[in-house]
Image: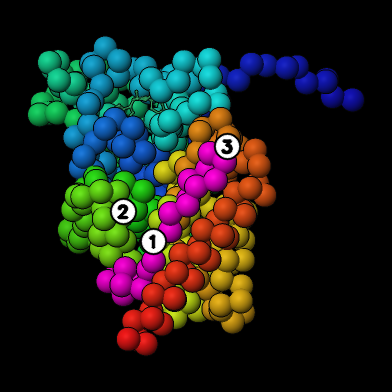
Amino acid sequence: MSAPPTIQQLGEDIVNRIAAGEVVERPASAVKELVENALDAGARRIDVTIADGGRTLIRVVDDGWGIAPAQLPLALARHATSKIDGSDLLNIHTFGFRGEALASLGAVGRLSLTSRRAGEEGAQITVNGGATTPTRPAALSGGTVVELRDLFFATPARLKFLRSDRAEAQAVADVMRRLAMAEPFVAFTLRDASGGEDRQVLRVNAETGDLFDALHGRLAAILGREFAENAVRVDAERDGFHMTGYAALPTYSRGAAVAQYLFVNNRPVRDKLLIGALKGAYADLLSRDRHPAAALFVSCDPQLVDVNVHPAKSEVRFRDPALVRGLLVSAVRHALLTAGHRASTTVAD
Ligand code: ADP
Ligand code: MG
């Protein structure tokens, strides 16, 4: 009989690598974390470059408020965050809060973080598969540059699960489009530098005007003029929940559920409840093989929704799901019917 095993505390490197498996599934999840960090830092312009589907390179440049040199090591430390103090997990207003993304990315790839805060010198810190180098001075006019190379080199098993570079690059573009819809006042670019080339994949300028104007402009830029011209404004409120955005007329429906963008407190989500409600709103307006197109934003007091369900945070849990469902259905139906009514009176006169 072999000796029974003893229990050992795992080292920090291996803990980070295991955790990275949950936070960073593929290059697109790394891009999401890095762009969200830029948005949390108040960036007005975010430029992303990837190569080989994000496997060999992901670079995110922002003009946000940056990180002070002395804080750079903490930015890479696990469970270190400037976004919550731990006292109120129900009251989260930023994209991030777990303090895991940079630690995880540095555990499974080669990450360099260069940043400059106003009034301070620029500085850089790097981490390769969990091994951190000391902070050193670096020239930068402001903001933050995160460069992530060779994602998953330290976890070859995960590397094997990636899809083709093309599929991974598409997933990155999808993440960027969703975040760009959520933040119409911020300028975004996505470039693909595979094979030494430099191809522009996405470019949206900062929108102006009120939020509805800005969103309309942003949706036109991302989903196309045709969507924007066929979309009606959704704006309704009930019991502390606000439902805003644009829903396309039934005549602009799609053959697949490809143009359904849902956000909770400005966070892109893939939530079954909301997707089901959207379908329900068009139930008697579309045949079964057609799918509505919409970009809808639910906002509420952070206390009424738990975003802490999954590390990748694309799932949420509402305190009162039936209320949210009912609001979405009635808000969208009201918008479509009012538009339909307006269209028919215009034809009549
Ligand atoms: P979280 O976003 O959950 O706090 P991260 O690991 O993503 O955790 O980031 C750790 C910390 O590093 C953040 O709380 C923030 O203070 C800082 N940080 C990360 N990226 C940026 C950035 N682009 N600009 C300014 N600060 C940043
Ligand atoms: Mg973060």
Answer whether residue 56 is visible to the viewer in this image: no
> Which quadrant of the structure image shows residue 294?
bottom left
Mark 1 burial class by Cα count in 10 Å: few <14, some 14-19, many 20+: some
Counting residues from the N terminus, which is met first, the one under dot 3 or under dot 1? Answer: 1
Residue drawn at x 59%, y 49% is 324
* Most foreground residue, 94 or 286: 286
**Which residue is located at x 83 percent, y 20 percent?**
3
3D distance between C-alphas at marks 2 and 1:
8 Å
Q: Which mark is residue 184?
A: none
Residue 229 covered by magenta stretch: yes
Q: As drawn, which residue projects farthest toward the front?
A: 349
x, y percent for residue 104 = 45, 32
Q: Image quadrant for the C terminus?
A: bottom left
Q: Amino acid at mark 2?
A: Phe
Give the residue number, with chain letter if any, for mark 3: 305
Label 3 environment density (alpha carbons within 10 Å; few <14, some 14–19, many ≥20):
many
User: Horizontal placement of 190 versus 256: left or right?
Assistant: left
- Does the residue at mark 3 contact the one at mark 1 (Cβ under 8 Å)? no
Q: Which residue is mark 1?
A: 233
Return the residue at label 2: 212
Residue 316 visible in the displayed image: yes
Residue 60 position within the rendered picture, expressed as x and y whole percent measured from the top left: 26, 41
Residue type indicated by callout 1: Arg
Name the one closer to the observer, 163 or 4: 163
Mark 2, secondary structure of its residue? helix
What is the distance, in whole Å, between disc 3 and disc 1 at their CAs? Answer: 24 Å
Asked if residue 76 is positioned above or below residue 251 in the image, the reply reads above
Residue drawn at (46%, 64%), measured in percent from left and top?
A: 335
Distance from Cα at disc 3 to Cα at disc 2: 24 Å
Which residues are the magenta region?
224-243
Q: Is residue 61 above or below residue 182?
A: above
Do the residues under discs 2 and 1 have CB atoms within 8 angstroms? yes
